[in-house]
Image: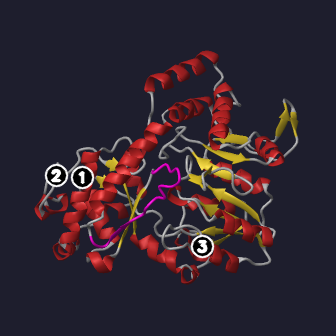
Amino acid sequence: MRKALLNDLAIFGGQVAFEERLYVGRPNIGNRKRLMERIDSILESRWLSNDGPLVTEFEQKVAKYVGVKHCIATCNATVALEILIRALDLQGEVIIPAFTFIATAHALEWQQITPVFCDIEPRQHLLDPSRVERAITSRTTGIIGVHLWGQICDVEALSDIANRHRLKLLFDAAHAFGSTYKNQHVGNFGSAEVFSFHATKFINTLEGGAVVTNDDELARKIRLMKNFGFTYWDEVSYVGTNGKMNEISAAMGLTSLESIQDFIAINYENYKRYTELLAPIPGIRMLQYDTGETNNYQYIVIEIDEEQTGISRDELLQVLWEDNVIARRYFHPGCHRMEPYLSKYPNAGSTLPVTEEKSKRVLVLPTGTTVCSEDITVICDIIAIALAHPKQLKERLRTTQPPFNRPVEVSVADAHKN
């Protein structure tokens, strides 16, 4: 339903724009018939886990698509990152951005390695190599770059720093499956890279992840580690864990891969529509993707400049939520302001000025196969109306509690959609 006036907004008593909530990262499904055929074959075979034929096929197809020698599928990307960190024998301190999902930091902290938070550059929100160099100490053993929003880190600069200081370099590529850097697919950089195939990613395995690498020995070690360290039926040769992907997850992954071009095409059309409608609105900067590279376009990222708009990112977010547009304030408030890091490094924010700024300005809008051009038009209507009436909006919000500040438990019923 199109909106044109202030009173059309749900927060002012207007009809809610969407009966069903629009989420960031609503799962793509692909060909349901083909998925069910695969699941039926799994149930017939009774081979549900332990490196079954579909997991093997999924690994082979991911490796071929990315152009790497090895893909090791895992139960999720966090476990994949933890295993990779251990396989590379990282210790002491490892430099990471604070502007990332908390799992990047937790994967280190979980193994008693200190995450050293580093600032990002302001345009693309990626790890700033000049800041990385300054963060290196005698205890630094590695760097984890994060390919945020499907954009790729400055691989050459980070590789140069890592080589000169004899540090391990790996990449959290959770957002970046299908993206390229100088026409080479993500997955080929550093010692290894980690993909996420969580339900919210545009290619998903229900829940899952993978490590991809061109290093034969590293791949061999990771395969041992994700299966308790078993070399043979009754022989354990390494300390490991249970990081295996199951067959039904692989079935979903294979089905997703078959629709990858369709998913990217839909994301790209949505990106173009948002760009067209948001460009005329003062105070909004939309993250622009490099059209000279392949990208998955799975995130629509905007920044709200409160000095120009007259309202904050959080105030706009509240307006959108009231109309059932469940936009998200990634990555708020930054890893350094979450526990246990906030207590350990209470002054970290003073060294992270760009992260501090972006965590207050960035907003991610719904896209994907469940969002159409008409939905985007309505979302942009809401944004345009809200930003055109900052004084009235602020007065209204003064008496309304933001729904996104409620405890997580309140939203558990919606968790399967998010």
Instruction: Quote the CA–CA distance across marks 2 and 3.
Output: 41 Å
Residue tagged 1? 377
> Residue 283: within the magenta?
yes
Q: Earlier in the sequence, mark 1 or mark 2?
A: 2
Q: Secondary structure at mark 2?
A: loop
- Which residue: 26% across, 77% down? 310
- Give the mark nearest the N terminus, 2 or 3: 2
* The one of 99 and 259 positioned closer to us in this rendering: 259
At label 2, the amino acid type is: Arg
Can you name the residue that lies furthest to the top here? 44
Specify the quadrant of the image occupied by residue 401.
bottom left
Q: Secondary structure at mark 3?
A: loop
Q: Residue 62 appears at what percent x and percent y? A: 63, 38
Q: Which mark is residue 128?
A: 3
Mark 1–mark 2 CB contact (< 8 Å): yes
> Over which residues does the magenta segment extend?
282-297
> Which residue is nearer to you in this view: 6 or 19?
6
Residue sitting at the far front:
292
Determine the residue positioned at 78% across, 45% down: 219
Q: Which residue is mark 2?
A: 2
Disc 3/disc 1 C-alpha distance (Å) = 35 Å
Display coloring: secondary structure
Q: Vertically, is 371 above or below 288?
A: above
Q: CA distance from mark 1 to mark 2?
A: 8 Å
Q: Is residue 243 visible?
A: yes
- Prevailing secondary structure class for the magenta stretch in the rendered image: loop
Q: Assess whether residue 92 is covered by the magenta stretch.
A: no
Residue 276 in picture, x, y percent from top left: 30, 58
Question: Disc 3, disc 1: CB below 8 Å?
Answer: no
